[in-house]
Amino acid sequence: MSGNTFGTQFRITTWGESHGPAVGIVVDGCPAGLPLSEADIQVDLDRRRPGQSKVSTSRSEEDRVEILSGTFDGRTMGTPISMIIRNKDAISSAYDAIRNTPRPGHADYTYQAKYGLRDHRGGGRSSARETVGRVAGGAVARKLLAQDGIDVVGYVTELGGVRSSISSISAVPAPSLSISDLRSATESNPVRCPDQKAIALMLQAVEVARKEGDSVGGVAEILAVGVPPGLGEPVFDKLDADLAKALMSIGAVKAVEIGAGVECARMRGSGMNDPLAFVEGAEGKVGFETNNAGGILGGISTGAPILCRIAVKPTPSIPKRQRTVDLVVGEDAEIEIKGRHDPSIPPRIVPVAEAMVALVLADHLLRQRSARLMD
Amino acid sequence: MSGNTFGTQFRITTWGESHGPAVGIVVDGCPAGLPLSEADIQVDLDRRRPGQSKVSTSRSEEDRVEILSGTFDGRTMGTPISMIIRNKDAISSAYDAIRNTPRPGHADYTYQAKYGLRDHRGGGRSSARETVGRVAGGAVARKLLAQDGIDVVGYVTELGGVRSSISSISAVPAPSLSISDLRSATESNPVRCPDQKAIALMLQAVEVARKEGDSVGGVAEILAVGVPPGLGEPVFDKLDADLAKALMSIGAVKAVEIGAGVECARMRGSGMNDPLAFVEGAEGKVGFETNNAGGILGGISTGAPILCRIAVKPTPSIPKRQRTVDLVVGEDAEIEIKGRHDPSIPPRIVPVAEAMVALVLADHLLRQRSARLMD
Amino acid sequence: MSGNTFGTQFRITTWGESHGPAVGIVVDGCPAGLPLSEADIQVDLDRRRPGQSKVSTSRSEEDRVEILSGTFDGRTMGTPISMIIRNKDAISSAYDAIRNTPRPGHADYTYQAKYGLRDHRGGGRSSARETVGRVAGGAVARKLLAQDGIDVVGYVTELGGVRSSISSISAVPAPSLSISDLRSATESNPVRCPDQKAIALMLQAVEVARKEGDSVGGVAEILAVGVPPGLGEPVFDKLDADLAKALMSIGAVKAVEIGAGVECARMRGSGMNDPLAFVEGAEGKVGFETNNAGGILGGISTGAPILCRIAVKPTPSIPKRQRTVDLVVGEDAEIEIKGRHDPSIPPRIVPVAEAMVALVLADHLLRQRSARLMD
Amino acid sequence: MSGNTFGTQFRITTWGESHGPAVGIVVDGCPAGLPLSEADIQVDLDRRRPGQSKVSTSRSEEDRVEILSGTFDGRTMGTPISMIIRNKDAISSAYDAIRNTPRPGHADYTYQAKYGLRDHRGGGRSSARETVGRVAGGAVARKLLAQDGIDVVGYVTELGGVRSSISSISAVPAPSLSISDLRSATESNPVRCPDQKAIALMLQAVEVARKEGDSVGGVAEILAVGVPPGLGEPVFDKLDADLAKALMSIGAVKAVEIGAGVECARMRGSGMNDPLAFVEGAEGKVGFETNNAGGILGGISTGAPILCRIAVKPTPSIPKRQRTVDLVVGEDAEIEIKGRHDPSIPPRIVPVAEAMVALVLADHLLRQRSARLMD
C-alpha cells in the first residue's frame, strides 16, 4: 500500500531507483492470448529514451527491455508480465555535492522528511527514470486497447511560452489531422509538436533558457480515440478522476484538464453542454456536436474522443545558483546543480502521459466487462 | 470494485440514489478513541444543504444524519461508522418527461450506455445528492485531522466571470487572511467568496444567467494548513495525484490545479522553484520562501500549506431549449429541463471539495504511520 | 482497510454492533439487470434468524431487511445495494456484569487490547449478529450465481460428537442425494442435518450439554454445484484460498478443509489424485472419477462440485463458572455468563457459511470475465 | 487483480514461471530503515532450495537472489524491494510428452480451462517454483518482525502416516522445546521433524512409497511467538482468516487448522475456552492457561503463541501409470510422469509456510499502527 501499484484489474507495480542496478515493472491482469513481444515494448521505450536531442538530457541509456515472465509462444498467458531494464549510464558522483542540500523543486527534502533516509543519487525513486516502468506497462495496455480499436496519442501544445495552433479542444468527432498524421507530425521533431510553424520558436525558447542556466515549462494534450461509450465507474472511480490521478502522478505535472478544462469556469451552460444527435448513416449511434466534455460525462465515456491536457512545470534542476538549506550543518546554503538534465520536460513527458492514459483505459475496459449480466 | 469506495486506510463507501429512500456512507478505518457525535457531522451537512439561497436549488432537504454504528459513549471504536440520511423532498414526476431524452451535459446517456438501464429520477446515482455521503465522511476525517492541528478551508475565487482578489497562490506561509477570518468571510455570503468586493458582482452574474434560462461556471480553491511534511506516497499514490482524483471525482469539476497550476507552463525553473530556508526562531524547521509547489514536492507534503484549485463547469440543467436524442423513438429531439437546479455550482461545491481534501489527508496521515521503523 | 470489506469485484462491506441501532451491508459490484427484491434477501435471513428452536438463542429478532439503494423497477442498476436490518430485541443490561471481565473464548479481551475501548454489550462488533449482513450479501450473490446454474447448499455432518452418514467427500459427480433433496432434508430439522437417523442423537447431545451449563461443537459441509471449470486465480487468490479465508472469518470456525481435507495427509498420491476421463455423452466435456480435490486444482475450479468443510468450536458463552480476569480491579476473577446464547453453533452457521461460499464464487465468476481476450 | 499480490500494507507481488528465465518478487510497504542484505534473504532460500536430500527433487538450482531496488547503504528506503532469482536447471523437454495430457492432481487442466492456453513446461506458473518469491518476501517480513521480538518456526508433525510426538497444541505459554531448540532440532534432518524418534520412520515411509512409484502426504505446524495482543482486524480480515488464506494458497495444502483445529468439533465449551489469568510477576499482563484458541480470539491475537497446522497432500507427480485425457486427440489416455519430483512435500513446505505466516503477521503489525489515536 505504498503507492507503487496502479490500476485495479489491469494493474502495474513499478520498482527501481535512478542509480540502482535496474528499474522494472510487473503487469498483472492482462488477459491471456494477447500477442506480445519485447519489440512491442521497445518501440515506446525508445520514444521515452534520453539522449536523443538538445532538448533532453545527455544521459545515454539503451533502455533495452527484457520480458522475464508472463508470455509463452509470443502470447500473454494471463500470468504476471515482469519486465526489467538495466541502468547503465548512471554517474552517481555528480550527486555527492548535494547529498545534504535538498534541491529546490525536487523531492529531496520531502523524501528525507518522510523516511528519515533516502538514496540521494539521481533522485533515487523520485527520479523521472521511474517512468521507464510506466512506459513499458503502457505499451502492454496499448496492445490490449488496439484489439478494440482504441488508440492514444499525445503531443505538445505549448512550450516556453510558444503556443501551437493544433489542439483537440472541441474538435469533434476527431481533430483536424487524422490520428496517424497527428502522430507522425508529432514524432518528426524533437519538441513533439505537430504544428510545424511552432517548432522552431519552441526550440529557440528552450535554447534561450538553457543558455541562461534556466528551464521552461509547457503543456501537452493526450487524445484517445475509438473509446466506446460506457467506460468508467460512477462516483469515485470516474474515468476522468482516474485519468486525473494517473496524469498528476507524473512528476512535474501541476494541472490536469479534461475537455474544455479551466475554460469551463468562464462558460455558460448553454455553451458548455454538448448537444446530442444521432450520427447520420450509423444506425442508432448517438454522437455529440461538440466535445467540451472531453468525451466523459458523469465519469463515464460518451464515445467521443477522450481529451486530457496537462500543465508541466519547468525542469527543477537548473545550473543557476539557488537558495536551499544544509540539513547536516543546519544552516541556509546555496546550490548549483550539476549533472545532465532536460531543459524542458514536455517533449519527453508525452510518451509517459500516453502510457498513463492507456493504462487507465485498459483497466476500465476490463472493469466494464462486469457491469451487466451476461446476455 | 465498482468505484463507490475511496481511500485505502481511511476508507469510505457511499451509496444511494437521488430519489431513492436514503443516501448514506460507511467510514472504515477511523482510529478508535476519536470523539464523534451526530452534531459533528451535521454542521458540515448543513453547509452543503440545498435550499439556502437564490444561488442554489429550492429542493428542501433537512439532511438529518443518523449514526448507526461505530461509536460508543461518544467515541469511535475502530469499527465501521455507518451513517444514513433520508431523502424527503424528491419530486420524481418532474423527471418523467426526460426518461428517454438524455439531458446534455449530464450522465443520462452514459449510464444508459454502461448499464443498459438506469434510475432516471433526479439523475439517480449520478445526482449531486450523492455528495451528502462525501460530506458526512469528510466531517469524520476533519475531526481526525484536527487532532493533529490540520485544518481545511475552501472558498470561491471566480464565478460567472467575476474574479475574487483573494487567492492563496504563492501565499506563504499562510494566506493574507488568517484561516478563521478566511472561513468566516467565506461562510457569511451565499457565493462563498471571501472577497467582500466581489460578492455583489458574482451574485449579479448568476442572476443575469438565471433570468436567461442559463447557468455559470466558476473556480474554487481549497487550502489545507498544518499539514506536516512527509504525507503522500511516491510514484502513483502521490498526495497531489490522490487530491486530483478526489477533486475530479466531484461532478462538474473539469480541471484540478496544484499550487501555481496551469501557470507553471509559462514559468521558468528559477521562478517556479520555491527556495528553502530555515525558519527563524524554529529550531531546525525548514520552510519555503514561496509556495508555487502548493505544498507538495515529489508527491509528498513539504509542510507548507496544501493548495488545490478546481474549475467547475456551469450547471448542465438549464431551462433553455437544447438539442438531444430520443432513445426510444430513435430520432433527434429537443428538451427543456424542469425541476429545481442550482444556477451555479461553485458555492455548494466548496464543502464537498473540502470533504474530499480532508479524506485524502486523513488517509495519508494514517498511511504515514507505516513509513518508518518505530523508534 | 479495517477488514470490514470482502471481495474484489463482487464486494461487500458490513457494519453494525450487536446492541447498536441496526446492522447492515453495502454490496458493490453486482452487475446491472439482476432481478432482486427484499423477499429474495428475507428468505435467507429467516434461515439465519435466532429464536427458532431449542438449539438456538431465544433472542427474538424479526430481521426485516430494507433495501435502500441500488435497485429500480425490481432490478439491480450496477450501483451499490445498501441494506439495513434494525436491532430490536437487544437486552444490554445482561452485559453490565461482564463489562470488565472478558469472557473466555470471546473477543472481549482482544478488542480491548487492540482498541483500548469497546462496546461490551452483546460483544459489540464481534457478535455473531454481524453475520446478518453476510447473509444478506450472500443472498444477492446467490441470485447472481443462479443465473449461471450455480447452487450452494450446506448441512451439518457432526454435532456434539454425533456423526452424520451423509457427506459429499469423494461423491462425484454429485452427492448421494440430489441437491434439492439434500436441501429439504437439511432444512426440515433444527440441527440442519440431512441424515434423519442422526437428528435425534444430535438433539440429545446438545440438550445434555445445555443442561450441564455447557455447549458442543460440530462440523458442517458446504457444497457448490454447477461451478464451471476456470474460476479462481493463480497463486494467492486461489479459489480454495479465498474460500478458506471466507469460512475462517466466521466466528467459531477453527478449521477449513477442501475435498479430502486433513485426510489427505494419510493418503498416497495414487489414491489422492482424481483420474480424468471424458464424460460419456457430453461431447468433449472432461470429468473426474473421484473428487478428493474438492473441485479445485491449482486454485482453479475443475468443474466438479466444490466441497468445503468447517470445524466449529462449541459456543464460548456458557453458564458454567469460568476463570478470567477483572481488568479494572487488576485481579483474577470468576464469571458466570448470562444472556441468551445458542448451545451449539453449527445449525445456525450453515446459512452464513453458504453465504460466504456464494460471495467467493460470485466474485470469481466476475473476475473470470477478464481472464481472456474477448472472442 | 489477478491474484499475484498478497497483503495490504506489507504487500508482495510475485511473478515467474517454472521454466521461464527467472522468478521474482516485489515487496512494497516495508518501512524505511530496516537493515537488509541479500544474505538475509539467501538463508531462507537455501532452506527451500531443491536437491538437498533424497526426499526432495533432484532439480539443482542455486537460487541466488539479487536485490535490484529498495535498499541503500544496507537499509530499506521505504521504496519497493525488487528481487530476482534466475532459473538455471530447467529441463523442459521432460514435459513435451504431457503437453496435451493433463496430469491428475495438477493444475494443467484447470489453467487450460481458464486461459485457453498455458506454459506446460514444469507446470509454468502453477509450479512450486513460484514459492521462491514467497520465501524471499517472507525473509523480509521476518526481519521486520524480529524488530518487535516476533519469531516464526515451522516443523513437520506427520509424514507418510508417521506421527511426531512433538506438537504445540495447547502448549502454553510456549512449546516443550524452546524456539531455538525446536528450530535446530527441525533443521537438522531432511524431514524437518523435531522428534528425533520419528525421523527414521518418516524417511522409511517416504522411501517405501517412492520405490512403489508413489508419494506420501503429511502435516506441518507453524508457530509464531512474541506476537503482541491486538493484531488482526475484525470481521473479514481476521488474523486467522488471513492465515487460512495465506496457507491454503500454497499448492498441496488441503486443510488449515488454528489451535485445537478440527478437534474443537468434539470438545465442549468448558474444555475449549482458555481461562484468563494475570501472569505472575508481570505487572498487569494477561495470560491464558491453555491455548486451544491458537493465540487468536475474534480474529485478533491474544498474546499467546499463534499456532497453525496444515494438511499437505501427497505429491501429485508420481511415476505410477494414471488415467487422464488427451485434450487434442479427444480420447481418454494414460500417463506416466517423468521429470524430477519431491516424493513428499511437507519438509520443503515448511519454509514456505513460515514465510506466509510471517507475511501475514508483518501486514497486521503495520495495520495495527492505525487502530487508535496517537497518544
Image (cartoon, coloured by chain):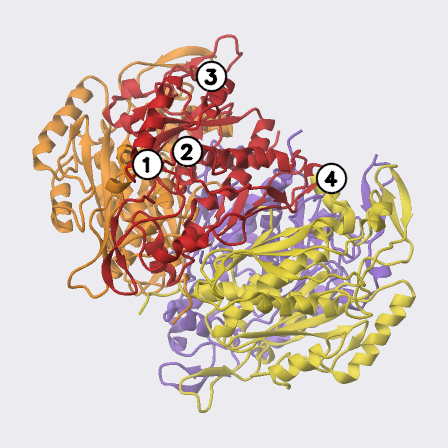
Chain colours: A yellow, B purple, C orange, D red
Q: Residues within 10 Å of mark 1 (few under 14, many from 20)?
A: many
Identify which residue is drawn at 58% across, 83% down. A174
Q: Residue furthest top?
A: D281
Bin the neighbour count of mark 4 within 10 Å (Cα to Cα): few under 14, some 14-19, many 20 and up: some
Mark 2 and mark 3: span between their CA atoms?
46 Å
Amino acid at dot 4: Leu
Q: Is circle 2 on the same chain as circle 4?
A: no
Residue C250 vs residue C306, the one in the foreground: C306
In this rendering, position of residue A345 left or right of residue A333: left
Mark 1–mark 3 distance (CA, rounded to whole Å): 49 Å
Task: Name the disc covering residue D286, or none.
Answer: 3
Residue A121, horizontal then vertical, whole percent: 78, 48
Distance in Å between CA atoms under marks 2 and 1: 10 Å
Instruction: Confirm or deny contact between disc 1 and disc 3 (CB under 8 A).
Output: no
Q: What label does residue C45 carry, if any?
A: none
Q: Tag 3, which secondary structure? A: strand
* Residue type marked 3: Val
Residue at 36% of width from left, 48% of height from top?
Answer: D338
Q: Are marks 1 and 3 on the same chain?
A: yes
In this view, the mark in front (1 or 3):
1
Residue identifier under label 2:
D54
